[in-house]
Amino acid sequence: MSVTAAEGFVASGLHAGIKKRRFDMAMIATEDRRPVPCTAVFTQNKFAAPPVELGRATLQANGGQAAAVLVNSGNANAGTGAAGYKNAQLMVAATGEALHIANSHVLVCSTGIIGTPLPMDPILSHVPRLVKKLSVEGAHDAARGILTTDHQAKEVVIKGSTFTLGGMAKGCGMIAPNMATMLAFLTTDADVPRSLMQKALKAASDATFNTLNVDGATSTNDTAMLLASGKRGKCDHDEFTNAVLAACRDLTMQMARDAEGMTRMAHLTVTGAHTNDQARIAAKSIVENNLVKCSWYGGDPYWGRLMAAAGSAGVDMSVAQSRVAYGGIVVAAGGVAIDHDGTALAEHMMGDEVDIEVHLGAGHGSAKMIGIDLGPGYIKENSKTS
Amino acid sequence: MSVTAAEGFVASGLHAGIKKRRFDMAMIATEDRRPVPCTAVFTQNKFAAPPVELGRATLQANGGQAAAVLVNSGNANAGTGAAGYKNAQLMVAATGEALHIANSHVLVCSTGIIGTPLPMDPILSHVPRLVKKLSVEGAHDAARGILTTDHQAKEVVIKGSTFTLGGMAKGCGMIAPNMATMLAFLTTDADVPRSLMQKALKAASDATFNTLNVDGATSTNDTAMLLASGKRGKCDHDEFTNAVLAACRDLTMQMARDAEGMTRMAHLTVTGAHTNDQARIAAKSIVENNLVKCSWYGGDPYWGRLMAAAGSAGVDMSVAQSRVAYGGIVVAAGGVAIDHDGTALAEHMMGDEVDIEVHLGAGHGSAKMIGIDLGPGYIKENSKTS
């Protein structure tokens, strides 16, 4: 049931015709159509899409609440200027009208190609149908409706002792810190202060979505959103915070496994940095380095590329104290190759997930990041708009 | 004649057996074996290779002069630690001995795979043979001896009114600002102050080599070097500076055309930035963006990706004042698509070189950068060490 697992929410999804065949619209709404506390984390891209600008403005103006969210995939309504903003408002108005709720309680999200006007006819004409289909059982359809080049719907349910937290997400290409072309919708039936919701969602996003780096690109449309119906009353705040983190982590791993053209995932830990910030900069330099990414595709433990990528990141590094390990097998120390179990290493490198530690030898800062290999599939998916 | 076009220099190249078949060693020397003024620009990578460390130390200690340069390709002698430093010194000593010159007048450069010890036997045993082969006619052999995955030797000759400047280079993968896996050797017969040599080489490197971005990776070994025999006496300083710039520009274009797996080159100009530095940051974000690079491979004028890449660079940008043009054809302004000649655009996009201007609408800063497309060839060349 994912996004409707928590009490008080319904959802739906369908094919409206924005995309050729796959589902391309989704709706989430409160069961009683009343607004509930809602918090969101949006993209930091300066070329943010109109629906993002509108969503920010709406939540700011209404103090952080929503009764419905309308989502379309296939077209991001980005790079569409004032006309795009107007179209986002038309989507809000159509949803408000069909649900008989105030426009100020409606949020919209779009994802897909950028720079092309939204096809408004199929979108607006399918809003009433989305409303009609709203149900607890509609969660999976909704999860399908938000996908772009994803192969699989991404859903999660976390059962707390006194509450449920559910959600859905879409990911794929352009995922990078901070949150690119990533949409995530979480709902809960806990009654929690809005400030806690915001803090938990921001912290979880930083620790999960923002550690996933598919191709270094950050998108115009990313949004993570959390709605709380409060139906099951107060809950333990730590348990709630942990549940949000667990849900985001689960969705992040689903996104990583389904990244465009990916064949292998790398769990990189940079340690021994001067500061945590420097560790993060070095980690980003490594996971975004195409030579490194190609070596992961080839299953090649080319540690020198990792060191070279770290060395070009502009952070403190003591080569003499440095160390590189794959799957716990140290292959280089002090900047030179050292003897290791080649068979065990080769086996680890051919797995679906590779663990890597790069120790910079310059302090106690550390950071984790998830990288994705670069293979022919990525290029195939991204060399043409359609 | 390239690197021996200027009076006073000889060169040679051969196959020593570091690589399977192709030439893998080169030597440049002064004809009379006397040291001449020499200046160099080295990589800024913190994981710099031993030959780079040794070269820096040598030029610092001897006040900037050299009588010979020994180069090997196939192995970068990087990630090799103290043993690698010792091997670089052994290469220096073998060259000094074979040429009967002081070790302090010998520089060595290595390029190729990193993290693997240099095969010293073939290298040392072929130094006497390189010396024997030294000649003015040996320039092309030398240009072949420094190549790694390059398909073609890269050579240039600039004839000044009173002097000649010649050179050779190797490029390919890992080229990024600042100067990654790029070796360039320039020689001149002008008699110019060392300070002018240094200034001209640094400025030319910044304006040419450092604007070429193949894959965002910066290498452990890049070096650009300039030697001046002084044989033809004083020259006009501006003319000399311009000649160094012209030679570096020519070699840069040869490197771009021969980049690993490349099919298309993009000449990007970012204008309207708050400062030149911000323009450079935005340009780097654009040319290193894999979605952008894939769109170049596909010949797809996907301007939204350029704007999204600029928008995620963290620099000032006014979407309302922004503009994107391909080949002078403005396709977006104010953050939205505008009418344009689609046929002319499609024709421009399918060419070998694409011109792109991204105007950020935030000031008067600008920067130029050369980007390379991302296609299957790059992955094929980089997913396995061998």
Image (tube, coloured by chain):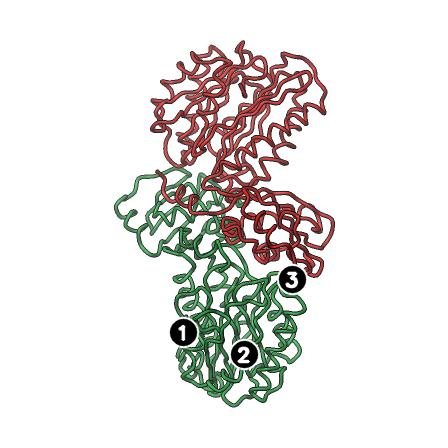
Chain colours: A green, B red
Left or right: A250, with B349 as reference point: left
Kind of element beneath mark 3: strand
Give the vertical position of A298 relative to A179 (above or below).
above
Left or right: B168, with A254 as reference point: right
Kind of element beneath mark 1: strand
Could you tell me residue A307's position as x and y percent? 45, 43
Q: Quadrant of residue A51?
A: bottom right
Q: Quadrant of the N terminus of chain A?
A: bottom left
Q: Nearer the viewer, mark 2 or mark 3?
A: 3
Could you tell me residue B273's position as x and y percent? 69, 51
Q: Pointer 1: what residue?
A: A156
**Residue found at the very far front of the displayed protein:** B343
Instruction: Give the mark nearer the N terminus: 1 vs 2.
Output: 2
Residue situated in front as seen by the camera: B55 or A70: A70
Dot 2 surroundings within 10 Å: few (below 14), some, or many (20 or more)?
many
Q: Pointer 3: what residue?
A: B336
Verify CB contact (< 8 Å) between mark 1 and mark 2: no
**Residue found at the very far right of the displayed protein:** B364
Give the vertical position of B185 relative to B372 (above or below).
above
Identified by mark 1, the residue type is: Val
Are dots 1 and 2 on a single chain? yes
Verify CB contact (< 8 Å) between mark 1 and mark 3: no
Kind of element beneath mark 2: strand
Could you tell me residue A46's position as x and y percent? 63, 60
Left or right: A167, with B286 as reference point: left
Q: Pointer 2: what residue?
A: A69
Specify the subunit that label 1 lies on: A
Give the vertical position of B61 relative to B350 (above or below).
above
Q: Quadrant of residue A105?
A: bottom right
Specify the subunit that label 3 lies on: B
Identified by mark 2, the residue type is: Val
